[in-house]
Amino acid sequence: MSTDDTTDSKSFIEHTQSQQQREDYWDRNEDVRESIRLCARALQRGERKHYHYIAKQLRDTLLPRLVGEGTSSPEDYDGVVGDHRDWSFDALTQFFEQPNTYVAAVSPEAGDRIAGRAKLTEVGDGFEVGEATARQIIGAAFRSCTAIAEEEEIIRTELRSRVDATMFDTKIGEHIQDAEQDLGDTVEAISLLSGALKNIHTGGTGQGKSAGVETEGEAYYLQNYTEGRDFKLLDFVGLRDGENWVYDIPQHDATMRNSREDQDAPPSFAEDPDRGPETYPELEILVPLTPGLTQQELPFDTDAEEFTVRPFTIPASKISKRLLISIMATKLTPEQESIIRSAYTDVNNRKDDWTLADLAEEVRSREELSDMKQKPIVSTLSDLQQHGFIRTQEDDYTLDWGDIFADTETITVFSQAFIDDEIAQFIAVGHLAETIVKQREQRYGIAEAVLLMREMWKVAPHNRRQSFDARAAALQEAIGHMLTELFRENRHSGVHLSCDTQYLSDLLKPIRELFNRYVVYNTNRDTVKDVFEWTANDKWGSFYNTLTPKPGEASIVGMVQPAIDERGIEFLGPVDFAGPSHHHFTESRDDNGWQARVDYLTPTEECEECGSEALDRAENLADLTCEDCGHEMVDLSLGRNEELRTPLSEGRRWDDEVPTRLTVNAGYDEDDTPDVERRPVAVFVSKCLQFREGEAVKRTDVRTAFNEFMLDHDREPRDFDDSGVMAKFGKRLSKAFGDDWDDITRTNRDGERAYKNLQLTTVGVEYLEDAMEGIEDAAAPLADR
């Protein structure tokens, strides 16, 4: 059999010899490292006995292992490490040739012999050496051995307590480590060995979770300007106040700017000497086309004469059965839910491009469902349609996903901030998540997708944290199961997920266990134990000890490169995240996203020193120089100017009213609509109450909501302290429900009498809340008013 080491085949003897050779090499290096470590400690102490120890280590370990194995000598290394600051050829040669002389010169016995006389020692080699000279030679010889060990890469040239933590070679922060920890000059904080990352940042309030997500998102984005794979960033969850509207604005936050500068990173992307305007992030902000959007003040780019925000609509026929059924089939029996599923399937098979009105009509045609069972379903579809953004495939504002994925240099942001109903918000979020994944899987040759999601618990919470509205809770659960499927199948889907949540226990259980990378900020032991169980790791105690309360510092377990390279490493941490180079929205400083854009995108127009308007803007668009006085300034608006304007005032004719052809018939003709003047209870029932099997509403809440309804219609409220009035109200209530009243029975809720299988609608809940707020205001102390 061939003995060529380059072949993949070896005999047993060859394999054993090769293995022994490797073991000898690593044993030798470990002996050298440990000896140098102990000698360095002894040198620091500096007494005779310590020099004696160093001398013996040089004679017995270091020199034999480094230059005394018959293959090298001090002369061989002089040309290699001769320029090293610690190299002393003469000292190493003297010790190498006469080691026993120097060992004896600093021995305890020699010290006893020279007591009271000159510090000269007669030694066995036939000459004497002074103790001071011996110490100098021993110290210099030891340092020369360390120079050789560095050249042989047995010990590191420089020990650093902080090294750059990177992602795709982009710095995201610094790894804080023991000085002897040898992870290299940089540490890659991710690995894509197992495919797309499923990444969660978790920890307490104010720990820097969302900033960490954005920092890593920026590293993904910058890959689009290097050779290799491209990534399309999509931030698709923006339920509140435009918090994701500022990716294209340089960092303004003083704390984060200082943090980045402390890590030798530029304070913002506009002040990075290695980046030009062509690599600055581009941003598109997409909002659902809802009624009144044309009267909403939105950021307007005065140079481009365009709104920064663009409206979009969703085709009803593209909303999955899973999402729509989840809100239509709430509290229905399995048989009734099957009927609803059948209705969806039938209308979907008949038409390629149908509307919610079509689906409502199909539900109405199902005779197996009573009017009372149909009513909440049709009512929900009607309410959903009134939000305006669910239309048809042919609508002018339908998204072109091909264009969205093709433009990887633009970060696409979706905002649901102008939808005033959480059910409609969740429909929009759920549809976007499903569509993005489907588009990524179905389109050939497009970039990998990176989904950014802040406060994930709001979208896919554990059932303890779900919405009080059963329909919204059903949507949250549907979205959760959809994300679970994505997690299970995304190895080759090319869809990365990076999100944050305060408590992992707030997430739907299947989701919290399926991430493959956990970025953990300051948290409790139980959470750390769970994370290590989910990632099949053991060293949770060591990991927990790395966590600190300092904002921005986190430790990472799962899919970090050091754990892939070294079997004994399970995690990386702590990592001090630098923060993103773009602006990071915080509620304490920024009112909302649209106002923040206007605040930060107002260009400097005159010199702060002399008031001159003659300003020269540099190529990076941020540096300004006054042409009159030479004063230099930084303008992070980059010369852009945005103002809050309404589309209506600018003549933008966005079709934000629901087209008549899309209107869902709520189930009665206008002529049959009850009159509030003549039949207030019937009107109240039609607007504020709905049948919900298994639910219950307190009778007092119904009466309270009814009186608020009466006040809203300029009618006198009823005096329900009067038993006769109460009895009459009950009769009118039963009459309004007709035959369906038989299914509404008596029960108790929180110790009070209640109606079973009945629930307040969204409108009814609002009336109740308004009434309770009025009661609380009336009961408040005078000093609080």
Image (cartoon, rainbow, N blue to C red):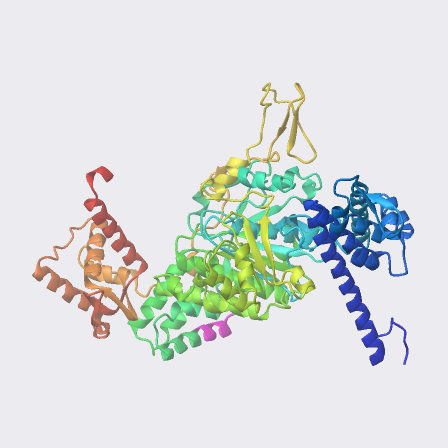
Q: Nearer the viewer, residue 691 or 571?
A: 571
Q: Is residue 287 above or below residue 487?
A: above
- Residue 347 belongs to magenta span: yes
- Residue 494 belongs to magenta span: no
Q: At x 75% / y 49%, what residue is drawn?
A: 157
Query: Residue 398 appears in which quarter of the rendering?
Result: bottom right
Query: Residue 582 appears in which quarter of the rendering?
Result: top right
Q: Is residue 660 above or below residue 606?
A: below
Query: Residue 8 appears in which quarter of the rendering?
Result: bottom right
Q: Is residue 639 above or below residue 681?
A: above
Q: Is residue 225 left or right of residue 542?
A: right
Q: Nearer the viewer, residue 148 or 249?
A: 148
Q: At x 83% / y 56%, what residue is drawn?
A: 63
Q: Position of residue 742 (x, y in %)?
A: 21, 75
Q: Position of residue 542 (x, y in %)?
A: 56, 60
The answer to whether residue 423 is visible is yes
The answer to whether residue 353 is visible is no
Q: Is residue 341 left or right of residue 199?
A: left
Q: Give the total of numbered labels.
A: 0
Quarter occupied by the C terminus: top left
Magenta stretch bounds: 344-351
Q: Is residue 463 left or right of residue 399?
A: left
Q: Main secondary structure of the magenta part?
A: helix
Q: Nearer the viewer, residue 585 or 294?
A: 585
Q: Position of residue 390 (x, y in %)?
A: 46, 59
Quarter occupied by the N terminus: bottom right
Q: Position of residue 495 (x, y in %)?
A: 60, 63
